[in-house]
Image (tube, rainbow, N blue to C red):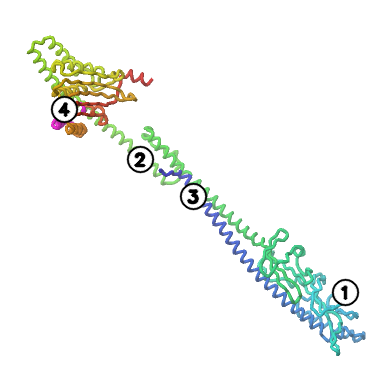
Amino acid sequence: MKKRLLPLQQQLLFLLCMFVVFIFSIIIWSVNDYMTIQRESMDSYLELYSSHMAQTARQSYTSYENIAYSVAYNTLVQDYIQEEDSARRYDSYKKVYNLLNNTAKLNSNLTDIAVISNDGNSISLTASPDLYSGYKETLSAPSYAFQSMGTLTIRDSVCHILSMPVHQLNTTGQHRYLGTVFLAINSQRLFSSDLTPEQGTMPEVLLIDEYGQLIHGNEALFAELPQDITSTSKAVKIDRKTYMARMYTISEAGSRLYILYDSSLYTGASFEVTLRMSIGIGAAMLLILLTFIIVCFPVSHSLRQLTHVMRDITDGEQKTIREGVDLTNVRFGCSEIRDIYSAFNDMLQEINHLNHTIFNTYTQMYELEMNNRQTEIDFLRSQINPHFLYNTLTTICGMSASGMNSQIIDVTNALSRIFRYSIQGGDMVSLSEELDIIRSYLMIQSYRFEDRFGVEYSISNEALPCQIPKMIIQPLVENAIVHGLEPSLKRGKIIISASLSADRDYLTISVMDTGVGMSAEKLQLLRDTVLSTDRYKRGNAKENLQALDAKSHDSIGILNVNSRIVLYYGEEYTLKLDSWAGAGTNIQIRIPCKRPLYQQSIRQE
């Protein structure tokens, strides 16, 4: 199966498409790898940030609990709450205020420390004690726990309020409730961090106390926050955004800390990187495409032009061979194509020169060959007449001795017709003319052999106009009489037939006798000699005929006819020999049927 080849332009386009696909595959792979690395980096960052934030929160709330505990059980605070004398209470107030002020300096996130008692001896560093009055009902049954009380806005900051009851142990071992210590924690300052790599990528922090109240963070996120978040990173969808979330328990404050990172931040960064890469590679592809069009298209176009010129030459355009290719109208594209065109033009000039030389040489050789062939044909034809003349004159001598004067006149007239026919006109005659001469020849032979054989004709009327070489049937008839019927002791018969092939392009002539025939060995020798007729041709008809005569003297007439057929028509159209010992011989000639010009025009119409 022949492999189908694509044009150069299509192959280059295919390579370009493969290159684009390859580049975009690399882009997709790189972006996917980048996003994976980015996601892992964000997960690592979220884990680090969350762990740090949770650890900071735990330490801070542990510190707040210690501060609350130290204030609640300080004797100055307890004495101030129980002091009833106004003068001593004022002195005690100043001492407690200093104590609270110094304590607040222990932690920068402490916005306010307040001590609230049911007896009215209350104190607050930065806010009015009345802000905490709303918690009296909540603290009517005070617990011993350090707990969250929700949020209050103090000094324009939302603060997380933590409380611890103040108890005094009496001599009987009973606890006496004196009041409550409140700590106001600036959660905004508490949950700020220096770990954020870029502005705008700060994770969302939600702090929820044990009562489910939002202490710090975005209320919208808190409203849709799932309850199944654990310390393991988990993707959650909130308000059409996907967050990576973690949860930590702040047992010191009875609270839960949630860290949420918007994953669209790193997907957006990945998209931006992808966009930049795509724009850069797209620009490179455009540049490559322009280069391809500028460089490759002229190369492909010039090669197609050269192919078109070659096809013109193949179709026989002699003008192209003579004039070559006009190089001024060709877009070469590269120097190699220009060199090919120049070399092609030089080749055409050389071919044109060689064609003239070959044509002249061939013409001379053809004329010489035709002269040699005509000479050989003339020689072969001349070999027929001496044999026939010798036999006929012998017959006339015999008839003269017998006083057969009228028969001698018939034989002499027939012989005159035969010789006039052989020397006049061209080499080709119609089958009808050849048969007339054969009848004259057989009339002469019938006198010689005294009716020892009969003649039967089976001639197709369509075959009569066909042109055949002159005197090509007579040697076969003579061979049938001399070598077939003459040696036989019984009366024989010659059957001469001629017919056209089914397509009417070939003429078959058959000469069959019922004579002695020949053995299989002799038949094979004669066939081999016929096949080798052309091998003995050395340009000398006399030497060739002598060589054949030496090989098969008894069949020189058949070999003569075969040589002439080969000279006229080539080796494809030769004799076919069949013979049966004691039964006879059949010789067939198959040659192209050439008609007169007027009949050829009628057949074409």
Q: Nearer the viewer, residue 358 or 539?
A: 539
Query: Which of the two discs, 3 and 4, labels the residue nearer the N terminus?
Result: 3
User: Within the magenta stretch, is there residue 555?
Assistant: yes
Q: Find the magenta span and give its range.
A: 537-563
- Residue with the mark numbered 4: 556
Q: Eyeballing the image, is 404 above or below 518?
A: above
Kindly identify the amino acid type of the residue bearing the numbered disc 2. Asp
Q: Amino acid at mark 1?
A: Glu
**Residue 568 part of the magenta segment:** no
The residue mark sitting in front, 3 or 1, is 1
Which SS class for mark 3?
helix
Residue 137 image label: 1
Q: Are marks 4 and 1 in contact (CB under 8 Å)?
A: no
Residue 15 got which mark? 3
Image spot of residue 87 (x, y percent)? 92, 86
Q: Is residue 537 visible?
A: no
Q: CA distance from mark 2 to mark 1?
A: 115 Å
Q: Which residue is mark 2?
A: 346
Q: Is residue 49 visible?
A: yes
**Crowding at mark 3 (Cα within 10 Å: few <14, some 14-19, many 20+):** few
Q: Amino acid at mark 3?
A: Leu
Q: Give me the C-alpha separation between circle 3 and circle 4.
A: 73 Å
Q: Assess whether mark 1 and mark 3 are in contact (beta carbons under 8 angstroms).
A: no
